[in-house]
Image (cartoon, rainbow, N blue to C red):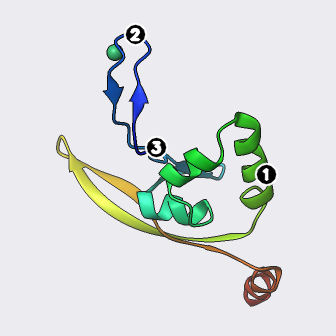
Amino acid sequence: MAGGYECKKCRKIVQVRMQYFFRAHFADCHDMIEVGFSRDVAAALMGGIDAETFKSKYTTSKEIEDFIAGNVLYKSIKLTVKRKEEKFLGETRQRFYAFAVQYLTEKDSQEIVESN
Ligand SMILES: [Zn+2]
C-alpha cells in the first residue's frame, strides 16, 4: 500500500513493506529439510504477483484462501533448490534455498514420471 497504514492510536502513518515469508518442509522417515524462499521466488510461486500487489488485490482471508486453492494447492511444481553450507559457532550447517520455481503442466509432470 503506497500511502502506508495509519496507526489507530497515535495517527502516525507507518510505512509497511509487504513481504512473503515462505518456508517449505520436505521430509521422509529419516530426515527433514527446510527450504527458504527469496522474495522473487516467493512471487513466482504466487503466480508472479509481488506481495504488495497481492495484498492490495486479495484482502480478506476468504479471497486469499480461494487464490491459494485455485492457483497453488495441489499443483505440480518443479522447485530448484540450492544448498549452502554455513558455519555457525564452529559447526557446519546446511541451508537450503529455493532458487527457481516452475509450474508444470500435466504433460510436463507425465514426462518427469516417465523418465524416472
Ligand atoms: Zn502509533
Image coordinates of residue 99 in percent, x first then y, are 45, 69
Q: Is residue 69 above or below residue 79?
A: above
Residue type of the residue flagged with mark 2: Lys
Residue type of the residue flagged with mark 1: Ala
Q: Which residue is mark 2?
A: 9
Relative to the observer, which residue lies in front, 96 or 63?
Answer: 63
Q: Is residue 106 visible?
A: yes
Q: Is mark 2 within 8 Å of ligand 1?
A: yes
Give the residue at x 50% y 58%: 50
Which image quadrant shows ligand 1? top left
Q: CA distance from mark 3 to mark 2?
A: 19 Å
Q: Secondary structure at mark 1?
A: helix
Q: Which residue is mark 1?
A: 69
Q: Is residue 22 above or below residue 48?
A: above
Q: Is residue 10 above or below residue 88?
A: above
Q: Secondary structure at mark 2?
A: loop
Determine whether, in the image, residue 106 is placed left or right of residue 72.
Answer: right
Q: Which residue is mark 3?
A: 1
Q: Is residue 97 above or below residue 65?
A: below
